[in-house]
Image: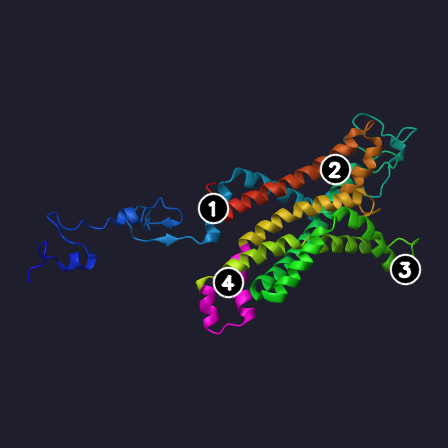
Amino acid sequence: MSHVGGDRSPSEAALGGVSGAGGVPALDTAAVLDPAVDGVDTTGPTGDSGGQSVRGRSPGQLAWARLRRDKIAIASGITLVFFALVAIFADLIVKAYGINKDQLFQNQLDAIGYPLGYLGGVSGDHWFGLEPLLGRDIFVQLVYGTRTSLGIALVAAILSTVIGVLLGLISGYLGGWVDSGISWVTDVLLAFPFIIFSLAAIPIVNTLVTGSVQEQPGVMTRIYVLVGVLVTFGWMSTARLVRGQVLSLREREFVDAARAAGAGSGHMILRQLLPNLWAPILVTFSLAVPQYVTAEAALSFLGIGVTEPVPDWGRMIFRSTSYISADPFYTFFPGIALFLLVLAFNLFGDSLRDALDPRSSR
């Protein structure tokens, strides 16, 4: 039987088009499978574009490719690796340097305690000079201070991220009175001024640990208390971010399908929701570490953080303020180290956020 517009071939009928005088145009597969499209590779085994294979890339591979193209990410990443290696191999570096962290060089100080020579005593034996009054080598103190500052910040960031993710998942998924309770606690803790509360809380906690006002706690006890305070006031932003993401994800089709299949709350939270939150969690973690570095340095600067004999950047900067006019290099070296570490973390966090965002143009 004849159809309107002429007879159609089986191939034309499969395409669903209405044939005219010129027929139905063929599908341009080359335009659809464009090798220039990000994440698709149509080259064959020999490398020529013959359409022999189509290889896709996962979101992680795409993010890694974007990150490698970002020069700022590469530069900041190299800086972070450098500081990490210094912190890990601090003992080997100091051993090769040939000076102990407790070794004093008071014979190289003048009568009022300032280093002899130029630039705060900088020389071939003391690369960054000497501490005024005490005569300790600044390079050694700076190397061990890297381990202290970076170690405390990483531990605090990991713990606060874990707590924030768990509470955010529970709050966003369960909702109801659980969500209201966690949100209320979050709002209360966010209302506390961190520095003022730390000035009041840390001495009280140290006194409770030792049982005496006159007795000072040990070095590790002070570090544990410091990490506890940082974590207590650090998990709220992560919890809020994760809660907002979960509120959006729990209405998606794959969550409804898992729920209809009889999946329990544990499976829904850990197997369905959590794998879709790694991108914002990684970005939040990378941006939280520099905040803890500066917070730890600030508390040590105020005298309620890490104390002697553990080297620390914040305490070095505090001690250098008394000699800044006569020996500015004592302030310069720990200050520039703190600045570079925080800047590298912030730049890398921004680059990581752009790399994990598929809508980013970078």
For residue 334, which numbered disc appears in the image? 2
Cα separation, mark 4 vs mark 1, equals 30 Å
Q: Amino acid at mark 3?
A: Gly
Pick whichever of labels 4 and 1 is earlier in the sequence.
Answer: 1
In what element is the residue under mark 4? loop
Q: Which residue is mark 1?
A: 65
Give whichever of 176, 154 is nearer the camera.
Answer: 176
- Report the residue at 60% width, 50% height from top: 284
Q: Residue furthest left?
A: 1
Asked whether 255 falls inside the magenta stretch, the response is yes
Q: Residue furthest top?
A: 118
Q: Which residue is mark 4?
A: 250
Answer whether residue 71 is visible to the viewer in this image: yes
Judge left or right: residue 133 versus residue 171: right
Asked whether 330 falls inside the magenta stretch, the response is no
For residue 211, which numbered disc appears in the image? 3
Which class describes the residues within 10 Å of circle 2: few (<14), some (14-19), or many (20+)? many
- Report the residue at 66% width, 41% height from top: 342
Judge left or right: residue 199 versus residue 169: right
Q: Position of residue 64 (x, y in %)?
A: 49, 48
Cα separation, mark 3 vs mark 2, equals 35 Å
Pick whichever of labels 1 and 2 is earlier in the sequence.
Answer: 1
Looking at the rendering, the stretch of residues picked out in magenta corresponds to 254-278
Judge left or right: residue 189 versus residue 101: left
Please say if the residues under marks 1 and 2 sit with CB atoms less than 8 Å apart: no
In what element is the residue under mark 3? loop
Q: Amino acid at mark 2?
A: Pro
Q: Nearer the viewer, mark 1 or mark 3?
A: 3
Pick whichever of labels 3 and 2 is earlier in the sequence.
Answer: 3
